[in-house]
Image (cartoon, rainbow, N blue to C red):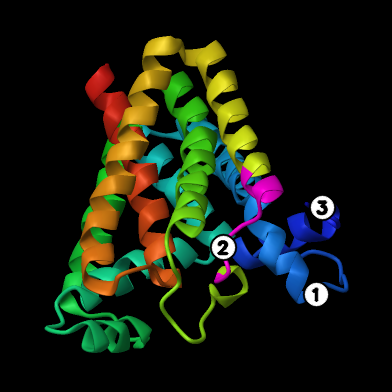
Amino acid sequence: MLSRPLRSLAAAWIFLTRIPLPAMALEEEDFAAAPAFYPLVGLLVGAIGAAALAAGHALASPVIAALLALAATLLATGAFHEDGLADLFDGLGAATRERMMEVMRDSRLGTFGAAALGVALALKVAALAELPPALALAALPLAHGVSRLSAVLVIATSSYVRAAGLAKPVAQGIGRGALAAAIATGLGALGLFGLVAGGGAVLAAVAGCVVGHVAIRLLFERRLGGYTGDCLGAVQQASELGVYLALVAWL
């Protein structure tokens, strides 16, 4: 059950973004329940990106608009999830599970991580610039929302493999009420997106999110036997990118 929903929402916002909130007394249980609101926070981050995209389209070209949207979301989150993607790919170059976890904890950016991050960011910009402006505006909140639901599903169905880390508050999984709230938010986002873009776009977005989710999980779960906080960030990034690329393919 979500006994303190407003505090859990605040915890989700504080954990996933770098946008300050008024001082609030939060406890460990609030951060443990916070995944219920990860998709909602994602929708709000995506809305920030959509506002930057709209401004870019009004002032300049689609590519510049896409770059502004990306920059806005990076500033809003402090590149939190992008850091996880880079750390995961750096870790994949390690020979053993133990060494992989050590590399992922290292704050330095390696060759594999830099390459993966560069490709992911470039593909996001290219895909957003390729989409019609109205569809790109609708896709940004959706992609950020459902990709964070994608990360929540990892929490619900996998095991946390570190003794300590940023994801430790959710190491025991997620309660039924919190999971239901996260799923309901994701379904609501898909419904609203469908009103704007149609059923075909919804199916494409879901397919792209699922492909991104599964592809990244295949990379880390075979090696780690579970997930770390970096893996959650990588899942979010792959799922978000999957939505954009699938919409481009659908068009």
Mark 3 or 1 closer to N-term? Answer: 3
* Point 47% across, 44% down: residue: 69
In the rendered image, residue 178 lying in the magenta stretch gets the answer yes
Q: Left or right? Give the position of 172 relative to 120.
A: right
Could you give the CA–CA distance between mark 2 and mark 3, rounded to whole angstroms?
A: 17 Å
Task: Decide which of 123, 176 is in the foreground and name it.
Answer: 176
Q: Which residue is mark 3?
A: 5
**Residue under label 2:** 173
Q: Under tag 2, what secondary structure?
A: loop
Task: Give the amino acid at mark 3.
Answer: Pro
Q: In this picture, which residue range is highlighted in magenta?
A: 171-179
Q: Quarter of the image containing the C terminus?
A: top left
Report the amino acid beneath label 1.
Answer: Glu
| Left or right, 14 with reference to 142 | right
Residue 176 falls inside the magenta stretch = yes
Please give left or right for residue 147 compared with residue 103 in the image. right
Q: Circle 1 — which element? A: loop
Image location of residue 245, percent across then percent down: 27, 34
Residue matched to label 1: 27
